[in-house]
Image (tube, rainbow, N blue to C red):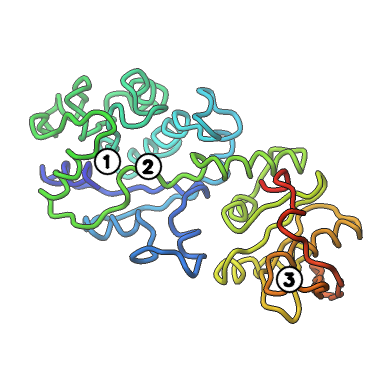
Amino acid sequence: MLATKVIMEQGIHVEGINFFTGFCVEGHTHAIRKNEKQKEKRNNALWVAEQLGIKLHIIDVIEEYKDVLLNPKHGYGQYMNPCLDCKIFMVNKAQAWAWMEENNFDFIITGEVMGQRPKSQRKATMPIIARESGSEDRLLRPLCAKHLPETLPEREGWVDRDKLHAFHGRNRKPQIALAEQFGFTDFAQPAGGCCFLTDESYSDKLVDLWKGRGTREYELDDIMLLKVGRHLRPAKNYKVIISREEGETNFLKGYRSEFFTMQTLPHTGPIALIDGETTQEDLRVAASLVARYGQGRHSDNVDVELRAPDGSLSILHVQPLKPEQVPKSWYI
């Protein structure tokens, strides 16, 4: 938001590109969860484009991004985040660079700040992004440009280097001050990030998914489901995804034609998806687990409705598990 405004202030036309990898928080869990505590449910990329008055181009890169996640040349960050390879991928000739050339733009800008991110925004890695992406000196970082060599837009006089910035490190106070100068009173959490791959819990679920299936392949539905509900694996051959609130319950209902699902009767309770190959005993364990999270959890016996993907129904009569009967090792 700031980098774009800095360039627009110099009379330069800017348009935005948002790459949809499937791993971003915005527009997913915030929209799914009915009780999500936030000012409003919004996609921050779209909202920022609206605030700036610029066009935004949303590009689906789910399939192309798989190789970045599965085979990162520069490795992962603290969890499953391939940040350096991700940045190179988004800037490179197959993505932003190609779009720039096809649409007759002259250079690319990003909001990177040197020293702000430990993996991709270091003095040593910023030149790697420019070099390996193919953008070379047509990649401009307006917020920290004065810490970096001059780029082509600066040398050619398209951009006044004196009006660019020298932000550095993890301190966001200079950015907050610049936001106030521009009159921005609302913006996304400046110290956060939208990528689920930087989240420990999500990364654990992703690795568990791959181990459980014996393959590192995934589809959009797989990575969407990792963002929703409690994930428990009572045995290697299956896991149970249990909704935590009404919004998640409604979302998971959309998968009833693909998974066996469970819900307690007549008590109010969550919906659960059963992912994997199960025996009848596995289903009884899963039903007892689901009943543990419903309003009938203190009852001696609870009816749990088992719905097959073809819509056929059966009832399991089970005793809800008590908290101490759910091993910590089941939680993913």
In this rendering, which labeled residue sits more in front, label 3 or label 1? Answer: 3
Viewer-side residue, 160 vs 105: 160
Residue sitting at 38 percent across and 21 percent down?
128
Measure the C-alpha gap from mark 2 to mark 1: 8 Å
The residue carrying mark 3 is 298
The residue carrying mark 1 is 105
As drawn, the label of residue 99 is 2
Residue sitting at 10 percent across and 42 percent down?
10
**Residue type (three-letter) at the residue carrying disc 3:** His
Q: Is residue 251 above or below residue 229?
A: below
**Residue type (three-letter) at the residue carrying disc 1:** Phe
Report the side of 312 relative to 323 (left or right).
Answer: right
Measure the C-alpha gap from mark 3 to mark 1: 64 Å
**Residue type (three-letter) at the residue carrying disc 2:** Trp
Viewer-side residue, 88 vs 1: 1
Q: Cβ–Cβ below 8 Å for labels 3 and 1?
A: no
Q: Residue 237, image x and y in percent?
A: 82, 47
As drawn, the label of residue 267 is none
Label 3 secondary element: loop
Q: Residue 297, image x and y in percent?
A: 72, 69
Asked which quadrant contains residue 152, the reply is top left
Circle 3 packing at 10 Å, graded few (<14), some (14-19), many (20+), is some
Nearer-N-terminus badge (3/2): 2
Label 2 secondary element: helix
Residue reaching furthest to the right: 280
